[in-house]
Image (cartoon, coloured by chain):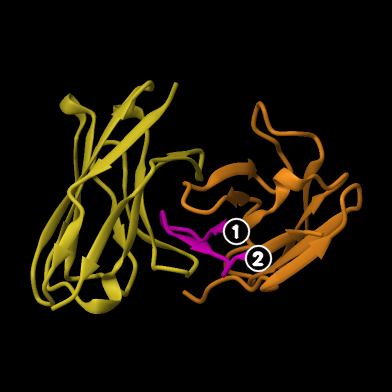
Chain colours: A yellow, B orange
Amino acid sequence: DVQLVESGGGLVKPGGSLRLSCAASGFTFSSHSMNWVRQAPGKGLEWVSSISSSSTDIYYADSVKGRFTISRDNAKSSLFLQMNSLRAEDTAVYYCARVAAATVDYWGQGTLVTVSS
Amino acid sequence: QSALTQPASVSGSPGQSITISCTGTSSDVGRFNLVSWYQQHPGKAPKLMIYEGSKRPSGVSNRFSGSKSGNTASLTISGLQAEDEADYYCCSYAGYSTWVFGGGTKLTVL
């Protein structure tokens, strides 16, 4: 079974940094693009970033461009999101999600990031 | 990119059918046959219910169906059951490995 397990969330002050991780199992991680998607409390889903299987293609939502960096380690079946210059509006549950043929098909359970002083 | 437009809420009685619309633009919903729908229960991760507009993943009830016309996609749930009560989100591929989601629709089973 496909499993995606996020970690690294927590409370951070505005302007601070946090690094999220996602451990993947149950599928050939190196064959799939991966996404980060977030959901602010009580709000809808927002695509954040994507990375191709070999890390050659990387894209970001305008809201995080220049502050967040997505990366992956195929040898360890892991996905990462480095978040810098965090703002209150970045407070959300961050989901790691697999992409298959341009469809976001499997999601992790999410990790909560709270940006507050 | 602007979020896709969904109604904030819909409701129906057990056994009835409901349809949730999802309106985008010619750059996303209208351009690609890559609309997906997700069901999300409170505190849970989204679950894929429909992909590529009208296809169901293995294990998803055939009470769920999807369609698209122009820039608008739709999700229909027939034979409503209490367990269908959840938030539903549409999502469209928008090119260059980017995606756009709808604002979500809260389904209440009366």
Residue located beneath label 2 in the image: B105
Residue type (three-letter) at the residue carrying disc 2:
Thr
Q: Secondary structure at mark 2?
A: strand
Residue B91 drawn in magenta: yes
Q: Quadrant of residue B52?
A: top right
Tell me: residue B96, above or below residue A100: below
The numbered mark at residue B22 is none
Q: Is residue A68 left or right of residue A35?
A: left
Q: Earlier in the sequence, mark 2 or mark 1?
A: 1
Q: What is the x, y in percent for residue B16?
A: 91, 52
> Which span is picked out in magenta?
B89-105
Quadrant (top left, top right, bottom left, bottom right) of the N terminus of chain A? top left
- Asked whether residue B30 appears in the rendered view, the answer is no
Residue at figure coordinates x 72%, y 47% from the top left: B84
Q: Residue furthest left?
A: A16
Callouts 2 and 1 close, C-beta under 8 Å: yes
Tell me: residue B98, above or below residue A22: below
Tell me: residue B98, above or below residue B51: below
Q: Is residue B62 left or right of residue A108?
A: right
Residue located beneath label 1 in the image: B89
- Between the C-alphas of marks 2 and 1, the distance is 6 Å
Q: Secondary structure at mark 1?
A: strand
Q: What is the x, y in percent for residue A113?
A: 24, 61
Q: What is the x, y in percent for residue A3?
A: 38, 29
Residue at figure coordinates x 17%, y 71% from the top left: A66
Label 1 neighbourhood size at 10 Å, few (<14), some (14-19), many (20+)?
A: many
Residue B104 drawn in magenta: yes
Q: Is residue A99 left or right of residue A82?
A: right
- Asked whether residue A62 appears in the rendered view, the answer is yes
Residue type (three-letter) at the residue carrying disc 1:
Tyr
